[in-house]
Image (spheres, coloured by chain):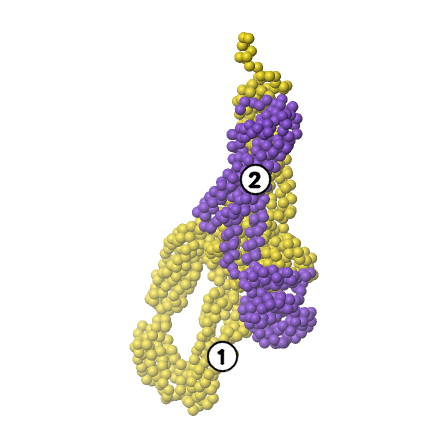
Amino acid sequence: MIALAITIFTASATVLSGLMDAPGAYAADEGFVISSSDAPTIFSSQVDMSMVQVLDSLGNISGASPEVFAFSSWGDASFVVRGVDLQRLQDTGPTIDLGPLEEEIESLSGGEALVGARLMKRLNIVPPCSIVLVGTYSSKLAFVEVLGSFSSGSPLDDELLVSLGTARHLSGMPEDLASIIRVKPDDPAWFDSLLSPRVARFVISDLGASRAVVEVNDTFQVMFDVRNWGGTAGTAEIAFKIDAADPSDSWQENITVSLAAHETRTVTRNVKVAHYGPVVVNASLGGGFPVELTKQVMVVAPYLTILVPREVLQGAEFDATVVTGTGAPVMGAAVVFDGISYVSDPDGKVRLSTDSTGNVPITASYEGYESALAIVEVLDLASLPGEFSPRIVDLSAVPDEAVEGDTIIVSVSVTNRASVGGTFQVPVTVDGSMLCTLSFVLGPVDQSTLSVAIEDLAPGSHFVSAGPYSVNVYIAPWYAEDPNLVQLVVRYGSSTSLSSSDSVPIYQAAKISEGNVAVALFSVGVVSALLASIAIVSVFSKEVHESRHKLGVLRTVGASRSSLRWIIFQQSIVVGLAGSAIGIVLGMIVVDVISASGVFAIFGHEFSIELASAPLVLILLGSVAISVLSALASAEVAARETTISSIRRLPGTPGPRIDPDELLRED
Amino acid sequence: MFCRSMFESLPLFRYTTRAKYTSLGIALCTMFIVASFLVTNGLRASMDNLSDNFESEMYLVTKVEDQVLQPFSDVAFGPLAQKMAFGAMGRAIAMPAELPVYVFSVYDPYDVLPGMFPAEEADLYVGPDLDLSGNVTLQSAATLTGVVVGEFSSPLFPSDWLLAGREFVGSLLMIDYRFNFAIIANPNASEIASVESGGFTVQSMVGIIGFLESGMRELEADVNWILVPSSFVVAVLAYSFIGSEVADKRHEIGIVKTIGAGRRRVLGYLMGESALLSAWGALLGLALGTVLAYGISTFASVVFTSVFTVKVSELLLAKAFAATVAAGLLGAVIPAVRMTSSSAVQDMKEVTPSS
C-alpha cells in the first residue's frame, strides 16, 4: 500500500514538473528568445527584424533565427504554424532531422512546409501532400505543400514549419517584424545580462551639431542622447570635450545625468569658437559598455555668398541675394554689377539688369566679411534658339554618405537656354529603378532646381541618376557609428525582453501570468504531497492499531515503551524504505508509459515528462520519514493503554458472567 | 427482525475520533479535486472571453480524400449555395522562368467575399508580391497560356498568388467547371451539419478560435488525471477506516452472524458505513474546495496583474462527489469482504476492548 501511495505521488510530481517545463515549447527548448516585453500575449509579440542583421554582425552570437507564429487548423486539428528561415533555425535551434524527401531542401519558400513527426500523426497525413491552412486572427487562406516531415525531439515536432511569408500572411505580421528572434550566444550569461539587465546600464548615441559649418564667434549647439537601458534607475558620467584648432577654444566637462529605468534624455551644450579651423566634438562614456562618439564642425571666417541665376537675358531684370556663410541675408551689402553699385535690402536682395552680353561679374562686400564674387552669363535673346531646349546641369545628393535611416535629399538643376519656355520631365532613378519623375516648368532662359527625398535606403552603395548625371550615395548600417554591441541596446534594449527558453510566457496565451500558474502548480504539488502523506499515515496507523495485542503482550513481559518504539522504528524504516523504493520505481515506469503515450498536451504541444534525480531522492527520504513518524505516533498512542486492556482479546469462549452479589447471597 | 435490531444497536461511528479524522482526510482529497476542476473551468471561461474577441464569419469547405482536395460542384449545396463563394486552387509552374506559383479562381455570384475577382477567360491577375508580366505559360495538370493584365487585391488570399478565370483554372487543373474549395458566410449550426453530412469538412477561417478551444480541451483532459491520486487516497482512507472498524467490532459482528445475519447484510452494513463517511467527507470537501478555488483566484488576481477567474459548475461538483464516494466504496471492499468471509466462531473469540 505504501508502494502504491509513492507510485501515485511520484507520477503526479513528474507530471507537474512537466507542466512547469511546458512554456519552453514555444521556444523549442533551445537557447534564448527575444520577444517584445509589452506584448499582452505571446501571440502578439512583435520584434524588429532589423535586430537580426545586428545580431549577425556580432562576433559572439552564433546565430539569430527570426520566427513568426501563426495558429491554424486542418480538418479537426488545430496546431501551431511557425514561419522560419530553415537554415537559421537549424543554426540556432534544436537539431532537425529531416525525413525522406523527394529533393534536398535548404530553405522553405512560397507555400512549402515541413510537418513535425507528432503533428503528422495527429493530422494523419503522409508527405508529400498539400493542405489548406486558415488565417489566425482573420479570415485568410493558404495552400501549402508539405514536402516532408522532420523530427527534432523538441516541441517543434508538434508544429508545421512554413516560410516566413506564409506565416506572415496567415497571422498578418508585417514584413519588418517577427514574433520572436531565437538567439544562440557564445556566452549566454553575458548576453542575458546585456539585454535583460537588472541594474542601470547606460549608452550615448546620436551625437549631432546644429550646423556642420559655422562662422567664427557664432554659437552652435551640440546634442547627444543618453539612455538607461537597464532595469533600475542610475547616474551616468559622460566626458564631453571640445577640441578646437586653437587651444584657447578647447574645453571639457564631465556631465552627470540621472535617469530612471528605460529613460532617454537629450543633453545639449552651446559651443562658441573664436578661431578658424576644425572643431572636434567628443562625447565618451566609460563603464562596462564604453562608447565614444565624435563629430567634426568646421569653423570658418565670415564670408558672403551671392545667390544669382547662372544665365539671364540681356535687358531682363533679375534678383541677386547676398547671404552670409550661414545663409542669413545681409542688409546693406555693397553689390557691384556691370560697373553699377547697389545696396542690398533687408532681405539681402538687389534687382539687377544689364544691356551687356557675355559673362558679367557680380561682387558683394560687407564690413567684417570676405567679399563674394559670382559670374552671370547674359544672353542675347536673338542669339538663342527659338526652340525649348532644357538640359540637366547638375545633380546632387546631400548627404552623399549617410547612416541607415537618414533622409537623402537629391536635387536636380535644369536650365532652358532658349527663347521659348516649356515643361521638362526628368526621371530620377535609384540603382536603375524608377524613383520618381520631376516636372520642371521653365520660361525663356530659365533655370530651376527641384528636390526629392529618398528614405529607407538599405546599407551599401547606391547610384542616383537623372539624365546623363549620376551620383553615388553610400549608406552605412545604423550601427556603423559605433560598431559595438551597445548599439543593439540603444535601438532595442528594454523594448524587448530576453527570456531563456524555459520561461517564454506561454501562459500569456491564456492571459494568465506565469505567477498564477506557479502558484497553482505549487499548491497542487503541496496537496499531492499531503495526500500521499495522509495515505501513508493512515496505513501505518491501521497496522499499529491491529498490532496492539502484540504490543500489550510485550509490555506484560517487561518491555519498556522505549523498547517498543525502537522495535516499531526498525520495522517502519524497513517497510517505509522498501515501499518507497518500490513505489519510486513503479512511479518512474508509469511516467515513462505516460510520456510515451503523449497523453499530456497543452496548447498544441505534447510535453515530455521527466523527473530529475534530486526530487526522487527527496520523495524517498520524505516518504520514509512520514512512515517512521506515523508509525511512532500510533505506537505511542497504543503504548499508553494499560497492558491488560491491550491484551484483553483472550482465546477461547468466555464462560457465563459471574454475578458476585448472587454468589454471596445466603439462600 | 432480531438481526435488524441487533444492527441498529451497533453504534455507527462509535469511534468518533477515527471517523472524524478519516472524513477530514476524505474532505481534503475532495477539496483538491474540486479546486482543480473549478480553476480549470475558470480558465475555460477566460479562454471563451478571449475567443469572443475574434469573429469568424467565414468557414472553409473542402472535401479531402487520399490527401487530395477533391473537386465538387456547387449544385451539391442546393439553396445553401447562395451563402457561398466557390473556387479552385492549385500549384503550377510559370514558364519560362520555371517559377512555382499558386493559381486560383473565384466564383462569387452572390458577393459573399470582400473584394473583386474579375478574371475572365485567359486574363491573369498577379498578387502584389508576384513578379510576373505579359504572356505566361502555366504548367500543371494541363498547360495553358494567359496574359497578365493587372493586380488583384484581396486580404483572403496570399499576395504571391495568381488569379485566373474559372474556366482557365478548371482547364489547368483538369477539373472543368468544378471547384475544390468553397467559403460559406455566417453559417448556423444546422447548415454546418448539413454540409458535413455531405462528406465535406467545414472549418472556421479564423484559426485562433479552434486553437484556443483545442488547447482548453487538452488542459481539461489533463486535469481529469487529478482524480487518480485523490481517489486513491480516499480509497486508502476508507480501507484503513473500515479495516480498523472491522478489527474493533469483530466480536459483535461475529455475534450478529451467529444469530442469522447473512454475508450480504454484514457487507451492506460495512459498505454503508463507508458510503456515509465518504459522502460526508465529499460534501465537506466540495465546500472547502470551492472556498479554496476562490481564495486562489483572489490571491493571484491581487498579487499578479492578470485575471484569474473561477467558475462553479454543478456538473463538475457532482463529478467530484461521485468520484469520492466511489473511491470510498472501492477502498472499503477488501476489509468488508474479508469480514464477511471469516467464520462467526473465530469472530466471537475476539473480545471488544472497552470503548
Q: Please, is residue B343 above or below residue A322 in the view?
A: above
Task: Write down the chain letter for disc 2.
Answer: B
The spot of residue B165 in percent (x, y) is: 62, 73
- Quadrant location of the N terminus of chain B in the rendered image: top right
Task: Write down the chain letter for disc 1.
Answer: A
Kindly identify the amino acid type of the residue bearing the numbered disc 1. Val
Quadrant of residue A270 within the rendered picture: bottom left
In the rendered image, the residue lying farthest to the top is A666
A22 or A479: nearer the viewer:
A22
Chain yellow in the figure, letter: A
Q: Is residue A2 in view from this perspective?
A: no
Crowd around label 1: few <14 · some 14–19 · many ≥20 (10 Å): some
- Tags 1 and 2 touching, CB below 8 Å: no
- Residue at the location (56% across, 71% down)? B110
B35 or A150: nearer the viewer:
B35
* Mark number displayed over residue B324: 2
Residue behind mark 1:
A426
Kindly identify the amino acid type of the residue bearing the numbered disc 2. Thr
The spot of residue B144 in percent (x, y) is: 67, 74
Q: How many marks?
A: 2
The spot of residue A519 in percent (x, y) is: 50, 44
- Residue at the location (55% across, 35% down)? B276
Q: Please, is residue A85 above or below residue A452 in the view?
A: above
Chain purple in the figure, letter: B
- Residue at the location (39% across, 67% down)? A211
